[in-house]
Image (cartoon, rainbow, N blue to C red):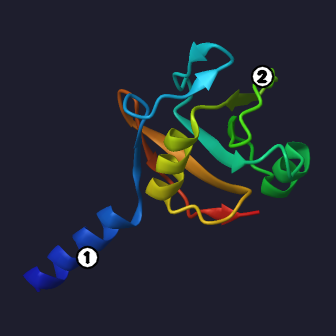
Amino acid sequence: MVACVFAYNNYRFSKYKFIDFDSLIFYEKSEIFTPKDDKFLLVVFSSNMSNLKEILEISNRNLPVVAIDIFQKRLANEENLSYITSDINTILKLMNLLNITSLPSSVEVIHQDKKIYKQDSKINKI
């Protein structure tokens, strides 16, 4: 019984990943990105190959959106949409951490502590 509980807890905590925005530095235009919302939809896409408006219509969630463009265009933020970017190594670290294997993809994240956010949904391949 104890082994089952231990195995379940290991599975439960390994299932979802944690993003530390102190160690992974992203930028909004020229400012360092600091998440403001307790829960948001994190979208990883390439502006070179897909239209974010169509991606967001498919995702259709009523959450603030933080979009990471691996093509690294520094687009202007909109009402409920923040565009962030970083160097390719940081973006690849994030993709590896969340196990994102195709673009575009999205995942809901929720605030845990300070600048640490937890993955709150499965990776949605759009």
**Hey, which residue is sitting farthest left in the picture?**
2
Above/below status of 53 relative to 95 = above
- Residue 78 in the figure: left or right of residue 42: right
Give how far across and how far down residue 31 sits, in percent.
Answer: 59, 13
Give how far across and how far down residue 5 sits, in percent.
Answer: 18, 77
The amino acid type of the residue labelled 1 equals Tyr
| For discs 2 and 1, the disc positioned in front in the rendered view | 2
Above/below status of 11 relative to 30 = below
Give how far across and how far down residue 19 sits, in percent.
Answer: 42, 43
- Residue 70 in the figure: left or right of residue 8: right
What mark, if any, has residue 31 been given in the picture? Answer: none
The amino acid type of the residue labelled 2 equals Asn
What mark, if any, has residue 77 been given in the picture? Answer: 2
Quarter holding residue 85:
top right
Q: Residues within 10 Å of mark 2 (few under 14, many from 20)?
A: some
Residue at 58% over, 41% down:
88
Secondary structure state at the residue bearing disc 1: helix
Above/below status of 115 relative to 17 = above
Quarter holding residue 53:
top right
Give how far across and how far down residue 89 sits, in percent.
Answer: 51, 42
